[in-house]
Image (spheres, helix red, strand yellow):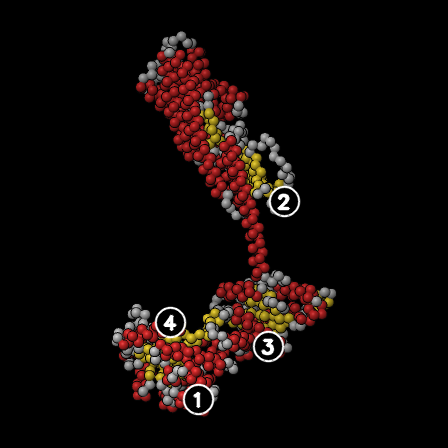
Amino acid sequence: MTAARTTAAAPRRIRALHIVVLAIALPAAVAGLFIPVDVPGGGDLSPLAQAAIATGVMALGQLARLRFRVGAGAVSVTWGEAAFIVGLYLAPSAWLPAATFVGAVLAWVLLTYFSDRRSPLEILHVAGSLTVAVAVGALATRAVGDPFDARLTPTLAGALALGSLAYLLVTGWLAALTLSVRQARPAGGLFLRALRAKLLMFVGNVLVGFVVISMIERDLRWLLLLPPALWLLQQTYGHRLRADEERRLWSAFAAATRELSRLDERAVATAGVSGALSIFGAEAVEVDVIRADGSRRRYSGDASGTLAEADVREPLPESLPEEAAGLVRLTVAGATVGELRVRFPRALEPAQREQMALAAYADALATALHDAATHQALKALTERSAFEAVHDPLTKLVNRAAFLIKGDAAMRQVVREVPVALLLLDLDRFKDVNDTLGHAAGDELLQSIAVRLGELVEPGELLARFDGDEFALLVTDLEAPDGDRSSPMPQALRRARALVEHLAAPIEVAGVVMSVEASVGVVVAPAGSADVAELVRRAENAMYQAKEAGDSVAWYDSAKDEASTDRLALLAELRDALTVEDQLVLALQPAVDLDTGAPTGVEALIRWRHPRRGSLSPVDFVRAVEGSDLLAPFTRYVVDKALTVAAEWAGEGLEVPISVNLSARSLLDPHLPSDIAELLRRHRVPARRLVLEITETVVLSELEVIDEVLGALRDLGVQLSVDDFGTGYSSFTFLTRIPVNEVKIDRSFVRSMADAPTSAAIVNATVDLGHRLGLRVVAEGVETADQRAALAALGCGAAQGYHFFKPMPADKIVAVLRSLLDSAQAQVFPLRADGAS
Ligand code: C2E
Ligand code: CA
Ligand code: CA
């Protein structure tokens, strides 16, 4: 009941298929005619009439057909099974293949003439397929019984049903095979899909066949009822097939439009072509894309799956030709972005529904093309601005920011400790060029220099232009020409001199020939020991040395570098920080009594919330402060803040002393005692509540002024504490010389106490001494419960460290102190103040 529809573009394989089918069909048809048949008293009809009627029936089965598209082909639904059954009843089964062949050829010649153009070969193929199917079906029927001119019994009906099934399977398989050859898709899937779609029609056709036989048996007039019944069935089949096709169309539509959401033109256009091919089962599709510059690109594809693209010259016609059913202009908001051309399967005019789908698909495609174009433009734009962000616009070399980042990345590629070099080159008297020849000449010179430097850059090296007339070169491979890597500095200096010499060759700028002189600062450092920003700083340092000495090249010498620029900047910023309230803040860390858990004191530790550098700890800036005239104001500032806190506690009824770290050099300041006295008075804080922590190393220097300052402080009544006890040279003698109130055992001993007997001995001796001299002994840096237990066992009175509290902001401390005092009173000593043991 089905026949595959072939297209004109039948490739060689299809032709081969035609030949195979005909090679089976024709002999089968001819052979059948030679099988002797026993024509029973078949009534009044002559054998010739019987053959003619059978041929007519088979032809009619083909003529009354419905056609539907499946994929890129179409399927004709015919009354094949019904004709097959009736034919077997009316003529000897051996004749039927021949009758089928002749009937089908006749029917298709008529169809070709009236509606559907077919090549002779295609017609022969259809006829051949049907003939093969009829032959197989007839054999299957005859295996059970012979229906020719017989009464329709259940057995006979079964035989006919079996034969019809064989017929269905053969036609279905041949149709699937043809489609699969044409569309290069597996035949199995197509076969199953076709069978599923045709099951209903198969059953209907077989029943129609039985009914017709019964009618002929009874009274031929009954046949008059046949046309309306057939019409009804035809309608049912049509609905069924159309519903299937509708579902296929829209699911293909959804899948195709989903595929359109791509980000570049080619991907969208190619998806557009494939999508249209699958939605419309089109023979060929073209998508023309009009680009922003007016050029046009054509993407095309056909049912065989070939895709192609090419540039197109001729412009789009102003208006679309009237008859262009499959041609749609692609527009977005009135602007034409392209054109979509769909060649529908021949002689299968697109229905209205397909026209609608085509319009909707064109809209989706236009939008997707437009989006892709926008995206590509945006991408190009961001790429350009990304380039501008990391490059110097004048020389196109990377800029300073990018040099720092890329340089760090490059250094990470180098094995740690392998030496790398940074060369910083600064032009001499560049300002003169600008001043005398103008800025344009200056720019020209910088560009020429960039080119010259570029000529000496080896692969893997990074050359940058910093602002102005500074250039930097990062060399990560310092191998000498002879392969020697053992002397990186001479190698780096060689490179620097080569750069200087290369620049010295005459350059013509604005008609003036000049020789460029430059100073290069060279730094060599093991990879991983410093970041590129630090190397730049050092190279700058060296470069200034070179300029000062009048040399062209100088290397970095750490002895001559006091991190001067950075240090000065930091101090200038500190000067400002001292005038505001919120940059220098205290972190507070309590020390607790190891017996009772009560707080024995709170140490004030300075933090700098630097607006630009982030949070700085004392090690980051205290050294710089100590070497500057800011030490006295800084110390006053910290003591002032600490006493503010102490005064607040006094207001809350908390009588806990606060400790302040004094810089060694503060003890050289004769004004310190009076300054502190003044602050104590101002905050109305009793002197005993202030503990000054002094590192013993300092105190040891036996300067007279130090004894005087310490004496004056003692007289004031403030407490003195020896910080980092044990790290100095003669800790114990010191304790007998200066009367102090507290010693803080340095945390290095606490840490190594468990493993190193000497550490344990020092802790032990300090605790002992403290007892004898009546001093408070505080262990610093207690981080574990084991350390706490060991210290308690040794009789150490108090301890401080992360195990109890990390330094905390001032607004937290009051609550902590209160809870410590409360639980000490209740004699419940928490292992950790936060309650977790
Ligand atoms: P320090 O006097 O020895 O202060 C104790 C340091 O140890 C603090 O570091 C503190 O945060 C840290 N620490 C506390 N508990 C533990 C612990 O359990 N484990 C470990 N690993 N560390 C602990 P920070 O605050 O960074 O202070 C460092 C140094 O800076 C101080 O050493 C002190 O000498 C100095 N410093 C702090 N504040 C000032 C100040 O206002 N003026 C002066 N001149 N120096 C200060
Ligand atoms: Ca301290
Ligand atoms: Ca300390």
Q: Residue 816's x, y, as percent?
A: 34, 73
Q: How many marks?
A: 4
- Report crowding for label 1: few under 14, some 14 to 19, many 20 or more residues within 10 A (C-alpha): many
Asked whether mark 2 lies closer than 8 Å to ligand 1, one says no
At mark 1, the secondary structure is helix
Residue 515 as seen in the image, left or right of residue 564: right
Which is closer to the viewer, label 1 or label 3? 1
Q: CA distance from mark 2 to mark 1?
A: 88 Å
Q: Residue 285's x, y, as percent?
A: 54, 36
Q: Which mark is residue 812?
A: 4
Indicate the amino acid at tag 1.
Answer: Val
Tell me where residue 458 sits by quadrant: bottom right
Q: Which residue is mark 3?
A: 545
Which is closer to the viewer, label 3 or label 2? 2
Q: CA distance from mark 3 to mark 4?
A: 50 Å
At mark 4, the secondary structure is helix
Q: CA distance from mark 3 to mark 2?
A: 60 Å
> Which quadrant of the rendered structure holds the N terminus?
top left
Indicate the amino acid at tag 4.
Answer: Lys
* Nearest to N terminus: mark 2 or mark 1: 2
